Image (cartoon, coloured by chain):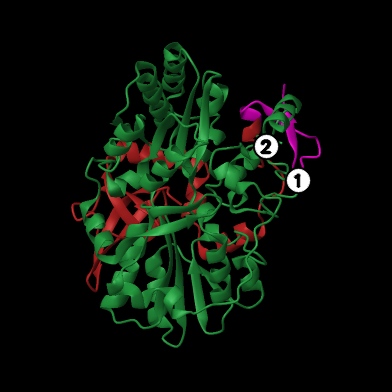
Chain colours: A red, B green
């Protein structure tokens, strides 16, 4: 929950007395509160946590981080819609290492793919 | 180290890892506070790139993991009430209470909603004047500005049907508690980068001085983590102990002053019980007198809740860094993400979930040695 995702501010509006913006996270656009980053203007990149922009960030860092977070699956989780969040909860992982990364870290799993793995030594 | 080549700058990562290998002359134990960092370390095999003597101890920085069971049970009781719309972030859905979780409460007819932002919950309160809308405000300093704004707006808009169930926790008092514990093994900390984007790092130099520990403000990407570890190891080897910022592209010394201003207006420090750890003085925030009317614990007087931890779950030992997740006998057996016994197996920040999802189980030799150490 402490991950903040970089996005590009595409539009700034005022909702009553709150400064809001449309922020694009590599294709997913969300409504974001900009009250804590008064210096941010349209075209800037900012890191966003639970719908709040917290800090400005340069474009190159933002794009590299977005790319990395996408590969790590962090974007799907942080930007999930309500339906996706419920679907995720109902399909909680049962088998270990569904994304195959354990192979990359040198560990293998039992052939039945079930919970318990063992060292690949 | 091939797993890092899928990321940008794989060569830089390997160079940093080599530098760590060159600098190290003896074992060191470094704690990353933040659960997001734990997942990145395990996912990317950072710990396996380090010299054998460098141990990463996983800290308690997983908000849903340290939220006390009694408060989870209270949340479930409120969510089950008719006339209530109970809002939460997605990672709380599967966190087990004593008898159920939020997902099951929804299945039994409770109106449980997952929101992206706390402002979505305020919006629900505006649109549903005949319902009580409760937002479960759990989190560290990173999340607190969002929750503070939600209650600030609710008050300004005169909403009588919005309240916050607050369980905010803070990093500096947790460092103080970990270092003061007789069982402490930690010699340096990676401070959580996004917490510091809000709070800055002005709170940390007194801790580095008092406990003579390096504290490195660190990001979440493999390179950030290797750089944070590298800087910590260099200080440790030199016998130095100061605060360094290894996340300058996001974090300033002062932090976000606008956010800190609203936090001071809405919250006040309070003693907070951390699940698996116990009460840490002044380690959390609660709504202050000005906003007390918006405190869900005041609004819903819930009593007679039966709260009981699973006897099999060792999440407390994991959260204190006393054991690694795979050393828990229930890990991968009675306890999996589908049937979690403790919150550390649920969250995207829980250490047990990280070990499970990335296939980190013990070898036979490790099991034997863990049995000898922790039986």
Q: Is residue A40 at least partly visible in the picture?
A: no
Taking B159 as reference, is B29 above or below it?
Answer: above
| Percent position of residue B212, x then y | 34, 29
| Percent position of residue B353, x then y | 61, 45
| Percent position of residue B287, x then y | 34, 68
Quarter of the rendering containing residue B33: top left
Residue B327: which disc? Answer: 2
| Mark 2 on the same chain as mark 1 | yes
**What's the residue at 31%, 54% (across, down)?**
A53
Taking B181 as reference, is B276 above or below it?
Answer: below
Q: Is residue B322 at least partly visible in the picture?
A: yes
Taking A109 as reference, is A46 above or below it?
Answer: below
Count of numbered tags: 2
Residue B333: which disc? Answer: 1
Secondary structure state at the residue bearing disc 1? loop
Quarter of the rendering containing residue A37: bottom left
In the picture, measured across the screen, residue B103 lies left or right of residue A110, that is left
* Label 2 environment density (alpha carbons within 10 Å; few <14, some 14–19, many ≥20): many
| Percent position of residue A81, x then y | 50, 62
In the picture, measured across the screen, residue A15 lies left or right of residue B116, that is left
Q: Quadrant of the C terminus of chain B?
A: top right
Q: Which residues are magenta?
A: A103-121
């Amino acid at each position: 929950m402490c991950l903040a995702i970089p996005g590009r501010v595409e539009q700034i509006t005022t909702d009553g007395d709150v400064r809001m913006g449309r922020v694009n996270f590599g294709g997913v656009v969300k409504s974001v509160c900009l009250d804590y980053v008064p210096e941010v203007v349209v075209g800037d990149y900012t890191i966003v946590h639970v719908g709040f922009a917290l800090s400005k960030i340069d474009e190159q860092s933002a794009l590299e981080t977005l790319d990395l977070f996408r590969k790590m699956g962090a974007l799907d989780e942080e930007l999930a819609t309500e339906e996706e969040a419920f679907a995720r909860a109902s399909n909680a992982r049962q088998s270990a290492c569904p994304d195959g990364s354990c192979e990359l870290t040198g560990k293998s799993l039992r052939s039945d793919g079930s919970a318990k793995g063992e060292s690949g030594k | 180290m091939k797993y890092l080549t899928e990321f940008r700058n794989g060569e830089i990562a390997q160079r940093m890892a080599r530098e760590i290998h060159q600098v190290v002359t003896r074992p060191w134990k470094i704690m990353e506070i933040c659960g997001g960092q734990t997942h990145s370390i395990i996912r990317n095999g950072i710990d396996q790139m380090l010299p054998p003597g460098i141990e990463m101890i996983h800290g308690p920085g997983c908000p849903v993991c340290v939220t006390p069971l009694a408060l989870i049970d209270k949340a479930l009781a409120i969510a089950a009430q008719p006339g209530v719309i109970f809002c939460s972030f997605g990672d709380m859905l599967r966190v087990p209470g004593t008898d159920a979780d939020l997902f099951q409460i929804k299945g039994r007819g409770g109106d449980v909603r997952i929101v992206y932002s706390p402002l979505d919950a305020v919006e629900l309160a505006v649109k549903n004047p005949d319902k009580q809308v409760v937002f479960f405000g759990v989190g560290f300093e990173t999340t607190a500005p969002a929750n503070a704004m939600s209650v600030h707006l609710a008050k300004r808009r005169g909403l009588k049907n919005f309240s916050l169930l607050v369980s905010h926790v803070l990093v500096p008092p947790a460092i103080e508690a970990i270092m003061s514990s007789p069982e402490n093994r930690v010699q340096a900390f990676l401070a959580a980068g996004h917490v510091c984007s809000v709070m800055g790092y002005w709170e940390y130099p007194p801790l580095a001085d008092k406990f003579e520990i390096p504290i490195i403000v660190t990001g979440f990407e493999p390179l950030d983590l290797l750089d944070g570890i590298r800087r910590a190891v260099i200080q440790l080897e030199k016998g130095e102990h100061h605060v360094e910022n290894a996340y300058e592209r996001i974090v300033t010394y002062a932090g976000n002053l606008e956010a800190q201003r609203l936090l001071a207006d809405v919250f006040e420090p309070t003693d907070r019980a951390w699940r698996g750890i116990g009460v840490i003085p002044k380690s959390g925030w609660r709504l202050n007198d000005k906003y007390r009317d918006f405190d869900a614990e005041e609004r819903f007087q819930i009593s007679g809740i039966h709260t009981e931890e699973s006897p099999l779950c060792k999440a407390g030992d994991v959260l204190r860094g006393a054991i690694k997740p795979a050393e828990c006998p229930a890990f991968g057996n009675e306890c999996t993400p589908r049937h979690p016994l403790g919150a550390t197996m649920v969250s995207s920040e829980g250490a047990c979930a990280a070990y499970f999802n990335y296939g980190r189980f013990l070898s036979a030799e490790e099991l034997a040695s863990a049995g000898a150490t922790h039986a």
